[in-house]
Amino acid sequence: MATTPQPPPPPAPAAAAGAHTVFVYGSLMADEVVRTILKRVPPAAPALLPNYHRFNIKGRIYPAILPVESKKVAGMVMTGVTDEELQILDAFEDVEYTRTRVDISLADSSDKMLADAYVWSDAEDPNLYGEWDFEEWKKLHMKDFLAMTNGFMHELEQPESKTRVETYESFMQQHEQPAPGTQVEG
């Protein structure tokens, strides 16, 4: 009995062809933030970015990285990020950051790989100082940051959406104002 040849298997999903690897080092190390932005948490592993430093930014609760010889930044590498998710991350990181291809190494195995990372756009920014601390950020700022991120994602769905920087600044201004009915001493 002759069998009819089977058609070839369907091609792999488009996500596989457009899969990206992204090194994250700040608020995006928190699964809750990633889930709010991407509606899922891509697979991730601890990773190191050599010859960069993670700075605090005066007046901001999120960090910046810039190249600094002999320093390293501990973070996570997310894999399987789709083209659409990368566009959402680009919008989230806004104009303050430039997506840059960097060499990283996996913390567990020291295997090296290329990944995209969001590098601070202004290398001469006088507002960068010290070393940003993820654990401190989780304790002091994650709750407010998640609320701001939810606002940004809601705004992103609107026809005339604000940028992430505008959303952040407006959120912080609202939270720094005294509550209605309270007096400000002057």
Image (cartoon, rainbow, N blue to C red):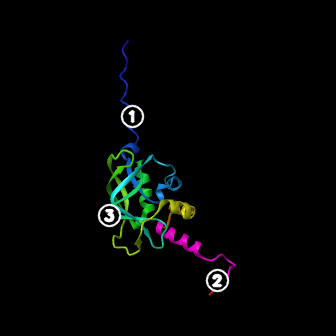
- Of all residues shown, which one is farthest toward the bottom? 186
Residue 69 position (above or below residue 43) = below
Q: Does label 1 or label 3 sit earlier along the sequence?
A: 1
Residue nearer the viewer, 113 or 172: 113
Identify which residue is drawn at 40% across, 56% down. Answer: 74
Q: Which mark is residue 154?
A: none
Secondary-structure class at tag 2: loop
Secondary-structure class at tag 3: strand
Q: Is residue 6 left or right of residue 153?
A: left
Residue 73 position (above or below residue 112) = below
Pointer 3 residue: 67
Q: Measuring from the top left, give residue 169's x and y in whole percent.
A: 51, 71
Q: Does label 3 or label 2 sit earlier along the sequence?
A: 3
Pointer 2 residue: 184
Stretch of the chain drawn in magenta: 163-184
Q: Measuring from the top left, give residue 35's x and y in whole percent.
A: 52, 52
Q: Which mark is residue 10?
A: 1
Three-letter amino acid code at the position of disc 3: Pro
- Quarter containing the N terminus: top left
